[in-house]
Amino acid sequence: MTRKLINLLVACACLSFIACGGGKQTPQSIAKKWCNLNARLHQAPAGGPEYGRAKAALNEYENEIDRKYGKDATFMDKVDEEIEKCEDASEGR
């Protein structure tokens, strides 16, 4: 019984580390999420509730990234470069 409990605790700990992803974000991962949120915004009917939720989610994410990395100009430049790569596709262009 004790061995099963230990195995269960180890498995839970591993899953929690995997789920958190270590908290480290890269310019590529930030750009990917931003482009996904931007695509949701551009696919939503203008003025509808989906559009409002998508716009709020995008703004919240932009604010979060700015709070975390806004003072690191080099990192933010890399984020902007990565966003440029996917922005047109996320807007359907």
Image: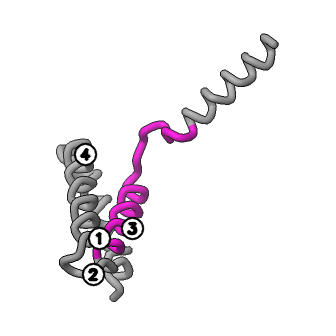
Q: Residue at x 32, y 75 (%)?
A: 87
Mark 4 nearby-residue class (10 Å; few <14, some 14–19, many ≥20): some
Q: Dividing the picture into quarters, in which one does residue 45 lie?
A: bottom left
Mark 4 lies on residue = 69
Given the image, on which type of amino acid does mark 1 rest? Glu
Given the image, on which type of amino acid does mark 2 rest? Pro
The image's mark for residue 36 is 3
> Counting residues from the N terminus, which is met first, the one under dot 1 or under dot 3?
3
Mark 3 nearby-residue class (10 Å; few <14, some 14–19, many ≥20): some
Residue 80 falls left or right of residue 47: right
Report how far apart the C-alphas of labels 1 and 4 lie in the structure.
Answer: 28 Å
Q: Residue at x 18, y 77 (%)?
A: 47
| Magenta segment boundaries in residue numbering | 18-41
> Counting residues from the N terminus, which is met first, the one under dot 2 or under dot 1?
2
Q: Is residue 82 visible?
A: no
Mark 2 lies on residue = 45
Q: Residue at x 79, y 19 (%)?
A: 4
> Counting residues from the N terminus, which is met first, the one under dot 4 or under dot 3?
3
Given the image, on which type of amino acid does mark 4 rest? Tyr
Report how far apart the C-alphas of labels 4 and 3 lie in the structure.
Answer: 20 Å
Q: Residue at x 35, y 68 (%)?
A: 35
Give the SS element for disc 4: helix
> Counting residues from the N terminus, which is met first, the one under dot 1 or under dot 4?
1
Q: Considering the image in quadrants, where does the C terminus appear?
A: bottom left
Report how far apart the C-alphas of labels 2 and 1 lie in the structure.
Answer: 7 Å
Given the image, on which type of amino acid does mark 3 rest? Asn
Give the SS element for disc 2: loop
Mark 1 lies on residue = 50
Pointers 2 and 3 in contact (CB under 8 A)?
Answer: no
